[in-house]
Amino acid sequence: MVHRPADSRLLTNLLNHEKDYSKHLSILLDYSHASLASFSAYASASSPPTSQVIIAVAGALTGADDALRSYAAAVQRWQDQLKALKSMEDDVGNIVRDREILVNRLIKASKSPQRPARDSASLLGGTSSPSGSSLNITKPEVQVGQKLSVAQAELQACEAHLAAKEQELSAFRARTIRTGLEARCKAMVECGWAWGEMGKEGMRALEGLDLAGGYGES
């Protein structure tokens, strides 16, 4: 199986911009709250029915802000889901790096030790005892075999772990995109509907002011 290291730069870029978006939505709502407070205070300097209309419209604008605040909360939840996705991608990336280390270790363990020519000659034609020569020849081979077996086992375990994590990441990514964006779109629909209703409410209040001032339709 070919493993492609997870490149989280695009996800990091998305997270950074979503963070900025959430921050500016919060700032916008703070400014709107201050503006509506000033607008409501302005009603106290007006006589009825103007003051009543201003208060009614301010209530409609407050309702619109409440709907936008709900949408902003959905954006924040989407951002939190992306953070969880990035954390999982980082975990898989770490496993891929561990796999590369184990591959290099296996390659190193698979290489037989190279003996100088004079050592080989002494082993073949020297005065050492047969039992001693046998030990000198087989001992490095045993060590290499043990290291190779350990390296193979470690790499196989890492491969199995990586394959499982990659499948988990793929499923989590699909689930995150589906549920996160679905919730955000649903919040957007609800926000749009609420804005439409609040707009109608404000327009009805203004129509009452027109009629009271003699500017309504006959």
Image (cartoon, rainbow, N blue to C red):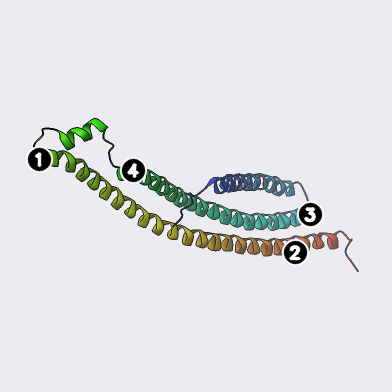
Give the number of the disc on residue 105.
4
* Residue type, mark 3 in image: Thr
Provide residue 142's location: percent of width, then percent of height.
20, 45
Label pair 2/4, CB-CB below 8 angstroms: no
Quarter in which the C terminus is drawn: bottom right
Query: Residue under circle 1?
Result: 130
Question: Can you tell which of label 1 and label 2 is closer to the viewer?
Answer: 1
Mark 4 to mark 3 CA distance (whole Å): 82 Å
**Residue closest to the eye, 199 or 153:** 153
The mark found on residue 50 in the picture is 3
Q: Is residue 56 left or right of residue 108?
A: right
Q: Residue at x 33, y 46 (%)?
A: 106
Whichever of labels 2 and 3 marks the residue nearer the N terminus, that label is 3
Q: Residue furthest bottom?
A: 218
Q: Could you tell which of marks 4 and 3 lies nearer the N-terminus?
A: 3
- Residue occupying the far right of the picture: 218
> Compared with residue 12, is residue 120 higher up or lower down, i.e. above or below?
above
Q: How far apart in space, not on screen, are marks 2 and 4 (Cα)?
A: 71 Å
| SS at circle 2 | helix
Q: Position of residue 39 (x, y in %)?
A: 72, 48
| Callout in the foreground (3, 1) | 1
- Toward the viewer: 36 or 87? 87
Residue that mark 2 sits on: 200
Q: Residues within 10 Å of mark 1 (few under 14, many from 20)?
A: few
Q: Few, some or many C-alpha atoms within 10 Å of disc 2 (few <14, some 14-19, many ≥20)?
A: few
| N-term-proximal mark, 3 vs 1 | 3
Q: Residue at x 77, y 64 (%)?
A: 204
Q: Secondary structure at mark 3?
A: helix
Q: CA distance from mark 1 to mark 2?
A: 104 Å
Residue at the outermost top position: 118
